[in-house]
């Protein structure tokens, strides 16, 4: 127990060390979750379009002009 | 490079890379955290606050590395009109901005106990803050244009112009009389940091890099599929009109 408390105390710097690791963890998790959500939403939308039989076969495009 | 201008081929490669990169991420970050938090020594001057280094430094490395990737991808897109280079740059930006924020925040948390201040307008801190603004500006440009082709060009130019900031960040601690400490790892004389601290630092650096690869490939996949959706909607509008 004493070892654990010493570890958590970080030699008196706990108020700086743990928030630093927490911020890094939170930002990296948020980026990963946001990226997966973005991908899932796009995959669902594309699957929906394919089911409804919309549009020409996959356009391997460099980006079209007006893109709204 | 031109082989992977074909989005379908690129996506197939990405699907193979992601699981391996994900596995390396988990293993190296777990090992880095174990060594960094438990098995490495405290610093004789900084005590346990030195452990902030194991997230602060890799984040700063990633902030600069990702911007460099963004600038290279932008150059490739502008020069060769590579089909997915502009999407690669676009996908990099939020990840780079995130790491820059982490570098600044963890740097503040390290600076307060060591320097006695949360912030100082020294060369390194100021140039990294400018890097953050460049990332935000880059993201804003993509959102500002309806025409994504124009957005890609404008964003690419900003990325290339802003790249001058990256060597400024790196060499700021040598060029100017500044508070932030000089380089301890990437130096001409080799690392000045003890191996017991260098090992977790490098492990975290590798883990952050493979994490970036995974998240980048997810975002690029979303961008490529998003482009397909727009193409199909246009085709549908054309057929139905």
Image (cartoon, helix red, strand yellow):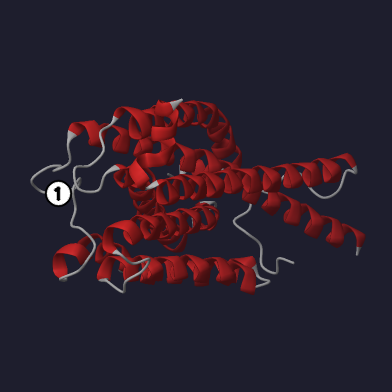
In this rendering, does residue B1 appear at all?
yes
Q: Residue at x 34, y 55 (%)?
A: B110
> From the viewer's perspective, is B167 left or right of B141?
left
Indicate the position of residue B185 as horizontal and vertical percent values: 20, 45
Above/below status of B147 relative to A10: below
Q: Nearer the viewer, residue B184 or B147?
A: B184
Point out the residue furthest to the left here.
B189
Residue B100: image quadrant is bottom left
Indicate the position of residue B187 as horizontal and vertical percent values: 14, 49
Residue B209: image quadrant is top left
Q: Residue at x 41, y 54 (%)?
A: B106
How dense is the environment of label 1, judged by Cα within 10 Å: few (below 14), some, or many (20 and up)? few
Above/below status of A42 relative to B27: below
The quarter of the picture where the N terminus of chain B appears is: top left
Q: Nearer the viewer, residue B109 or B14?
A: B109
Q: Chain of mark 1?
A: B
Indicate the position of residue B218 as horizontal and vertical percent values: 59, 42
Above/below status of A4 relative to B74: above
Indicate the position of residue B103 as horizontal and vertical percent values: 40, 55
Q: Nearer the viewer, residue B26 or A40?
A: B26
The quarter of the picture where the C terminus of chain B appears is: bottom right
Residue highlighted by disc 1? B187
How many numbered marks are there?
1
Point out the residue furthest to the front here.
A2
In this rendering, does residue B220 appear at all?
no
**Label 1's element?**
loop
Q: Residue at x 44, y 29 (%)?
A: A4
């Amino acid at each position: 127990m004493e070892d654990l408390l010493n570890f958590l105390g970080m030699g008196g710097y706990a108020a700086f060390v743990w928030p630093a690791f927490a911020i890094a963890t939170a930002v990296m998790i948020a980026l990963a979750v946001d990226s997966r959500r973005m991908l899932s939403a796009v995959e669902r939308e594309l699957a929906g379009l394919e089911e409804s039989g919309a549009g020409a076969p996959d356009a391997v495009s460099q980006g079209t002009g007006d893109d709204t | 490079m031109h082989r992977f201008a074909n989005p379908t081929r690129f996506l197939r490669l990405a699907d193979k890379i992601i699981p391996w990169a994900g596995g390396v991420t988990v293993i190296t970050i777990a090992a880095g955290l174990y060594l960094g938090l438990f098995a490495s020594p405290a610093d004789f001057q900084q005590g346990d606050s030195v452990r902030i280094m194991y997230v602060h430094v890799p984040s700063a490395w990633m902030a600069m590395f990702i911007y460099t990737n963004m600038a290279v991808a932008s150059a490739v897109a502008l020069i060769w009109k590579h089909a997915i280079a502009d999407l690669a740059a676009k996908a990099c930006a939020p990840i780079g901005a995130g790491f820059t924020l982490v570098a600044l925040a963890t740097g503040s948390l390290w600076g307060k106990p060591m320097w006695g201040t949360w912030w100082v307008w020294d060369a390194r801190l100021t140039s990294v803050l400018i890097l953050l603004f460049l990332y935000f500006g880059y993201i804003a440009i993509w959102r500002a244009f309806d025409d994504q082709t124009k957005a890609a060009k404008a964003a690419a130019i900003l990325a290339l112009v802003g790249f001058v900031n990256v060597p400024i960040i790196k060499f700021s601690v040598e060029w100017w009389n500044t508070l932030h400490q000089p380089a301890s790892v990437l130096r001409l004389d080799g690392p000045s940091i003890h191996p017991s601290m260098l090992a977790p630092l490098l492990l975290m650096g590798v883990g952050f890099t493979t994490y970036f690869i995974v998240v980048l490939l997810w975002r690029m996949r979303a961008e490529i599929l998003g482009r397909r959706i727009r193409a199909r909607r246009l085709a549908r509008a054309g057929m139905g009109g």
